[in-house]
Amino acid sequence: MTTLSSAPVASLLARLFAAADANPPAQSPAFAGVTSEDRGRMMRSKTDYRDFYAKLSDFALPVSREVGGLLYMLARATNARSIVEFGTSFGLSTIHLASALRDNGGGRLITSEFEPGKLATAKANLVEAGLADLVEFREGDALETLAVDLPETIDLVLLDGAKALYPDILDRVESRLRPGAILIADNADYCPEYLDRVGTIANGYMSMPFSDEVEFTIRLV
């Protein structure tokens, strides 16, 4: 048995995913009349993202169950002890990553979220999961919260916040990435600049799409 497949984590995740499925963002009145083009523009913007995500403050916006399982497996396979997450939301991906840390024998997961309500929910979920001792929650703009006090080496990074900021977040963690470190970027197709950067071997990365949802990247040097 693993932490991920055992109580209390397994039943908690099942409940949280079911709640997310029952409350999709498309049901929000804030998006009535908003076209897919408008949504794409807001997700690509470095100035409109705060307003966009504020409208989604009541929605979990989790990774899929499959991607959550992938995160756990990658963290276990690399014996990760130091993880950085951009975009906590309600903490579903955080639970998967912290479960891996627990089964790896411990470690530190730094996660950043600028919506206070979401961070409060995530903290409560991690407490219920029995994993809060492994997680350092940072509230505020990740451009600031992830610019200081990072581990000397980072084993895994999850990018699941404002898509336009992926290159800026990478700037803040890049010098700490160990050779072989893994980056998972959700909906990275909204940030061509990020894809160009990690898709160029000369930049020290090898990358490929894992699915329509995420880009899978390793640090080569």
Image (spheres, helix red, strand yellow):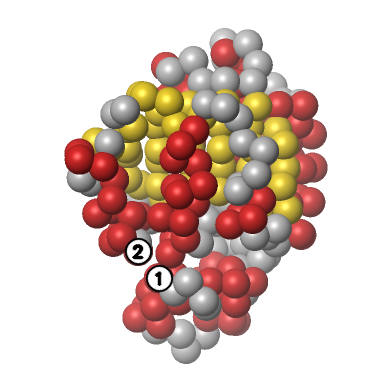
Label 2, secondary structure: give it. helix
Q: Please give left or right for residue 200 compared with residue 157 in the image.
A: left
Work out whether residue 100 can be spotted: no
* Amino acid found under the numbered disc labelled 2: Tyr
Residue 215 is drawn in which quadrant?
A: top left
As drawn, 202 above or below 180 = below
Tell me if 41 is positioned left or right of 4 in this view: left
Residue that label 2 marks: 190
Residue 45: horizontal and vertical position, in percent? 44, 74
Q: Do the residues bearing badges 2 and 1 touch, measured as CB atoms within 8 Å?
A: yes
What is the residue that sits farthest to the bottom in this orientation? Answer: 33
**Pointer 2: residues within 10 angstroms few (<14), some, or many (20+)?**
some
Of 8 and 154, nearer the camera is 154
The mark nearer the N terminus, 2 or 1, is: 1
Q: Secondary structure at mark 1?
A: helix
Residue 118, picture quadrant: bottom right
Q: Nearer the viewer, residue 184 or 61?
A: 184
Alpha carbon of mark 2 to alpha carbon of mark 1: how far? 6 Å
Q: Is residue 201 above or below residue 75?
A: below
Q: Which residue is mark 1?
A: 44
Q: Position of residue 56 (x, y in %)?
A: 61, 68
Residue drawn at 72 percent across, 36 percent down: 136
Q: Say which quadrant the C terminus sits in.
A: top left
